[in-house]
């Protein structure tokens, strides 16, 4: 089951972050694909169940333009995502104090509302922090991978037990 990195970006930072994360996942033997959100659509959920949402924030805490159609299709069609797992890498600017990291938060909220289960804490990068977002993401990923491995290897172990029990 490939892990899909869904990228919401306007000026490209989230895509740079996704590229770095993708490389680290590959080094960790996790098959993954980057999908910019203007190319994401609901049928994807029939075959893809594991996602890392990597998005910035614009407007009044809104998702970036390239991810608006996908975001609104989730809000309007309300697909059942109860077999989906996801993580959130959010980018923002704490000078926008009321809407800080609103893009990541919106995706987190709608995925959770539709029944998906979040792995790990939501990452919230502040572009004024002096920390490069890709550096923060790679550090955040270390803990995230511990949780993700429990999901991946836990389910393999459970299947093995079930198969063994069936004889
Ligand atoms: C016009 C504009 C509006 C923004 N609005 C917000 C905002 O409401 N909240 C926030 O946390 N960050 C906001 N940001 C910061 C961006 O989300 C941040 O710079 C991010 O790293 C950009 O990533 P991108 O290059 O992938 O689009 C805004 C940036 C710009 C240029």
Image (cartoon, rainbow, N blue to C red):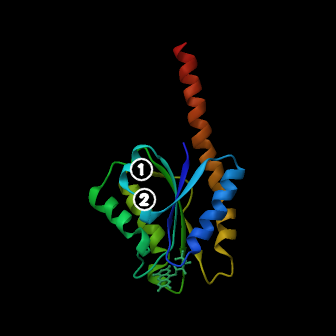
Q: Residues within 10 Å of mark 2 (few under 14, many from 20)?
A: some
Q: Secondary structure at mark 1?
A: helix
For the residues bearing labels 1 and 2, Cβ distance under 8 angstroms: yes
**Which dot marks residue 59?**
none
Q: Farthest residue in the bottom direction?
A: 95
Q: Is residue 144 left or right of residue 104?
A: right
The answer to which of 113 and 156 lies nearer the viewer is: 156
Circle 1 is placed at which residue position?
44
- The quadrant of the rendering that contains the C terminus is top right
Q: Height in image: 24 above or below 2?
A: below
Q: Is mark 1 within 8 Å of ligand 1?
A: no
Instruction: Please give the name of the residue rendered at 68% of the width and 46% of the height, measured from the top-left corner.
Output: 29
Q: Residues within 10 Å of mark 1 (few under 14, many from 20)?
A: few
Q: Position of residue 7 (x, y in %)?
A: 51, 65
Q: Position of residue 93 (x, y in %)?
A: 54, 82
Q: Height in image: 145 above or below 102?
A: above
Q: Height in image: 96 above or below 77?
A: below
Instruction: Please give the name of the residue rendered at 64% of the width and 73% of the height, measured from the top-left corner.
Output: 133
The answer to which of 36 and 137 lies nearer the viewer is: 36
Evaluate whether residue 63 shows in this view.
no
Q: Farthest residue in the front direction?
A: 39
- In this figure, what is the number of numbered marks? 2
- Whole-angstrom CA distance, mark 1 to mark 2, is 7 Å
Circle 2 is placed at which residue position?
40
Instruction: Please give the name of the residue rendered at 42% of the width and 51% of the height, measured from the top-left corner.
Output: 116
Q: Farthest residue in the left direction?
A: 76
The answer to which of 130 and 52 lies nearer the viewer is: 52
Q: Secondary structure at mark 2?
A: loop
Instruction: Please give the name of the residue rendered at 55% of the width and 73% of the height, measured from the top-left corner.
Output: 91
């Amino acid at each position: 089951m490939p892990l899909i990195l869904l990228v919401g970006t306007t000026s490209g930072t989230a895509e740079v972050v996704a590229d770095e994360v993708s490389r680290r996942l590959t080094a960790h033997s996790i098959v993954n694909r980057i999908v910019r959100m203007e190319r994401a659509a609901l049928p994807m959920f029939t075959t893809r169940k594991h996602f890392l949402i990597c998005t910035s924030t614009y407007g009044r805490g809104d998702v970036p333009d390239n991810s608006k159609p996908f975001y609104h299709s989730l809000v309007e069609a309300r697909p059942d995502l109860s077999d989906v797992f996801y993580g959130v890498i959010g980018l923002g600017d704490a000078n926008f104090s009321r809407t800080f990291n609103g893009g990541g938060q919106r995706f987190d909220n709608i995925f959770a509302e539709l029944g998906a289960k979040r792995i790990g804490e939501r990452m919230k990068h502040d572009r004024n922090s002096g920390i490069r977002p890709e550096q923060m993401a790679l550090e955040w990923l270390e803990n995230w991978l511990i949780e993700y491995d429990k999901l991946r290897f836990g389910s393999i172990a459970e299947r093995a037990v079930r198969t063994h029990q069936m004889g």
